[in-house]
Each structure stands twice: as structure tokens, then as C-alpha cells.
Amino acid sequence: MTTYSILFYLLAALVVVSTGIAITRRNMVHVVIYLVFSFFGTAMIFYLFGAPLLAALEIIVYAGAIMVLFLFIIMMLRAEAGDAAFLPLKQWIPAAALCGALGILGAAVLTVDPSTGKILEAAAASPTVFGHYLIQRHWLSIELVSVLLLVALVGALHLGQSEPPAKSEESLL
């Protein structure tokens, strides 16, 4: 078993565990934090497979932009926290363990000796070529996704607003 396969299995287990923890939490902020751990692990897997552009896009788009959007939606909807205590110890332990594991595995991915051998050959495409391909072939789907995200944001804003006070009949006269 090569170093790459060991790193892959460790990262895959980390992604599965952090996603599993995310779907079992009641506090929505904790869900977002564990999903960010999952996205960072997925980005490391992409980097390990020789796709640094996809790894960067995973971090920038998913762990960055979409998770910030989810946090704004959670704040707008004023989601109630399930726990009364502020970050109890049982919440810190898995988060700290996942953060430490991601840090160690990330350092290993970046410093592993490439002479250990690769099973898969990396497909080489520059970001410019990839961007031109996306815009030329898939521009409509990119625009549809952006409109869908805009509609979801407006819907969340509408749901998060409080009801306006009802007008009394006396004020209408």
C-alpha cells in the first residue's frame, strides 16, 4: 500500500465522519462547521488526485461562498440553537479532533514524496482552458444556477422577515 492510498483512505474516512457528524447535529452553525471540514477533506482528495484547480474551487466555492451563504440564511431565519450552553465540551472534542486530523493530513498531502508512485495519471488542463470550456459549453447552466441561488436567497430573506403588524379597521377609515 502506497503513501497516496493511505492518505486517500484517511481523508475519505475523515470526510465521511465529518459529514456524519454534520447530519446528526441540531445546532445549524455546528452543521455548517462540520460541512466545512468535509469540504476541506474533499479538496485535499482532489489535490491528491492531481487536480489542484478543483481543490481550489472546492475551497473557494463550497467551503467559502456557499457556507457563508448558509450562515447568512441561518442568521436571517433566526434558527434557534438546541443547546443552552455555549459550545459544551462534547461539541469541542469532535471539532478539535477533525481539525487536527485535517491539519496533519493536509501537511502530509503537501509534503509526501511524489516518487512513491502514482496509480492514476493526472489529466493536465490549465485553468484558462478549463474556464473557456465552461463558458463556451455550459454558460446556460452556470447562469441558471446563479439565478436559482438568487431566488433561494430572496426566499430565505422573505421567510426570515417578521410579519408586518396588522392594520386595524379604525386606521383604514
Image: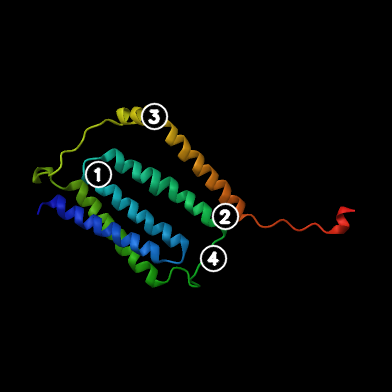
Quadrant occupied by the N terminus:
bottom left
Image disc number at residue 135: 3
Of the residues shown, which amino acid type is indicated by label 2? Met
**Vertical arrangement, residue 94 with respect to residue 163, above or below:** below
**Along the line of sight, the residue nearer the viewer: 164 or 84:** 164
How far across and how far down the image is residue 102, in percent?
Answer: 28, 56
Disc 1 to disc 3, C-alpha distance: 23 Å
Mark 3 residue crowding within 10 angstroms, few (<14) / some (14–19) / many (20+): few
Which secondary structure lies at badge 4? loop
Question: Where is mark 4, residue-wise?
Answer: 80
Image disc number at residue 47: 1
Question: Where is mark 2, residue-wise?
Answer: 76
Q: Is residue 107 left or right of residue 142?
A: left
Task: Report which quarter residue 37 is drawn in.
Answer: bottom left
Residue depicted at 69% across the width and 57% down the height: 163
Q: Is residue 145 left or right of residue 136?
A: right
| Extreme-right residue of the structure | 173
Disc 2 to disc 1, C-alpha distance: 35 Å
Mark 4 residue crowding within 10 angstroms, few (<14) / some (14–19) / many (20+): few
**Along the line of sight, the residue nearer the viewer: 144 or 74:** 144
Image disc number at residue 109: none
Disc 4 to disc 3, C-alpha distance: 41 Å
